[in-house]
Amino acid sequence: MLIELKNVSHIYADDFQGTEALKNINLKIRDHEFIGLVGHTGSGKSTLVQLLNGLIKPSSGSVIIDGVNITEEKTGLLGIRRKIGLVFQYPEHQLFEETVFGDVAFGPRNLGLSEEEVEVRVRESLELVGLDYEEFKDRSPFNLSGGQQRKVAIAGVLAMKPEVLILDEPSAGLDPQGRQQLISLLEYLYNKKGMTIILVSHRMEEIAHLANRVIVMSEGEIIFDDNPAKVFSEVERIRELGLDLPEITEILWRLNRKGLKVRTDIFSLAEAVEEISRELRGSEIC
Amino acid sequence: MALIELRGVDFSYNEMEAPALKNINLTVEAGEFVSIIGGNGSGKSTLAKLLNVLLVPSAGEVIIDGMNTADEENWLKIRQKIGMVFQNPDNQLVATRVEDDVAFGPENLGIPSPEIRKRVDKALEAVGMERFKDYPPHNLSGGQKQRVAIAGIIAMEPECIVLDEPTAMLDPQGRKEVMETIHFLNKEKGITIIHITHFMEETVGADRIIVMNQGSIHKTGSPLEIFREIDDLKKLGLDVPLVVEMAHELRKKGIKIPDILSINELVDSLCS
């Protein structure tokens, strides 16, 4: 499924200063990409994400999903929302049903699926996020821990079987273990389920580790759109934009400036350790 | 006398479920900067809420500056001494102008107006937000909102501020602003800080780290002591700052690196 944005600009109707939240964005997202979307607060990331799922319509330009121009008046958005799942920031704030089952089943039931099919989907989605179906299905979502609530909310989106999954800061507020579980889930959905994933995150190490394409936004525009190694080699520019580098990149980059000629396009700890020790053995001076 | 003392504290939200805290013994001296880490559900937030009497222990005692939180007569005084800052800045701001928001607490204490004026100015200056005093809070960034929330607490002139994941909802810039602010308040204003976080790298500047696990204090120690035990922390579902782990892995390769906690220290030790 191809997602295409053509000359998209957006000004929020209630913004009397007329600030363009998005300025003439052109973008193509293809099947089975893992996109990391980064930018300072207010850079336009969230606006972009809401356009992709038809939650808002752009002031000008068109959004074409799977050949259908969703910016045209008559286009039904239900089909789009089925194909493109959006996990909002703090999605657990939107849990509302009395049981975990009811919450995850809400979307599939709205699709008019049979109760048997709904149950299959709820079971599958809960297992995907690592919650045991029998143990959790009858519990109240409000008595779960924050991390478990987050999982239930994500399961609710997965139960719609979207082709594209968009997640806005899904690891915010999770403990290190919860974060690790989420990263494993995203890897699984991408590698085994073949989903297209768009991840919005301030955690550059997550982005560098997971994404094969990084889009950097600032003031409503796309500043970089390339693979992680290329994007994170733009050290000065990334800093100017008020963003962090992945910590490993930061370390390698500083070592490099001090004269230890290590590569800086490495994003895994094991490889970075290998590179530093190799280089240290090679040169006595640093 | 310690500022905060917990003796054999248990706490249960619900008799049917496992207690949230079990036999907590803890002392915090005035002027300390203490970070608390632990997985979701380890009891960190419950512990925080016991300190300014949002909760009262099911067993044991919480003593704040000599006052027992079990005694209702002490509650107001304790809440003046111990201020709390929560995760979501939007839930903590009530007024339409920044300075009104900061004045809200002292006004409720019945403090005379000229004194409030002084306190508000001082508090906004302490968090670096004096230029924004006439702004509507909703126009501020997350980090700025959180600093205003902290100013509202400072205006009450507390001896201690308890912050429960104050940076969880912020971007990197906002996180940095908040961390710099609370270190400034600790060093320059002598305010005791109790800081709960999931960001391990935020704890390296603390005097002491408390590691919580399943309602108990697993261990306490300096950042160097705590992060030396990488495997132990990982078993609890926690982590160490990446730079500490990198140094650990480099040592395994035979590279001599002293104890380090920051990128600067690592880079200096490798390039000297």
Image (spheres, coloured by chain):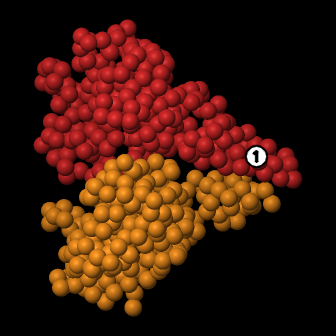
Chain colours: A red, B orange
Location of residue A231 in the rendering, given as x and y in whole percent from the top left corner = 61, 33
The number of discs equals 1
Q: Give the residue displayed 48% in from the left and 79% down from the top.
A: B190
Location of residue B224 in the rendering, given as x and y in whole percent from the top left corner = 58, 68
Please tell me whether residue A201 is drawn above or below residue B21 in the rendered image.
Answer: above
For disc 1, the chain is A
Q: Can residue A25 be seen by looking at this rendering?
A: yes
Nearer to us in this view, B57 or B232: B57
Residue A53 left/right relative to B262 = left
Residue at the disc numbered 1: A256
Residue B190 left/right relative to A148 = right
Q: Quadrant of the C terminus of chain B?
A: bottom right
Q: Give the residue displayed 66% in from the left and 66% down from the top.
A: B259
Q: Can residue B217 be seen by looking at this rendering?
A: no
Q: Quadrant of the N terminus of chain B?
A: bottom left
Residue placed furthest toward the front: B114
Q: Give the residue displayed 69% in from the left and 54% down from the top.
A: B250
The disc labelled 1 sits on which kind of residue? Asn
Location of residue A170 in the rendering, given as x and y in whole percent from the top left corner = 38, 41
Nearer to us in this view, B30 or A26: A26
Residue placed furthest toward the top: A67
Location of residue B29 in the rendering, given as x and y in whole percent from the top left corner = 43, 83
Please tell me whether residue A97 is drawn above or below residue B149 in the rendered image.
Answer: above
Q: Give the residue displayed 35% in from the left and 73% down from the top.
A: B117
Nearer to us in this view, A133 or A282: A282
Please tell me whether residue A178 is drawn above or below residue B193 in the rendered image.
Answer: above
Residue B176 left/right relative to B78 = right
Nearer to us in this view, A78 or B159: B159
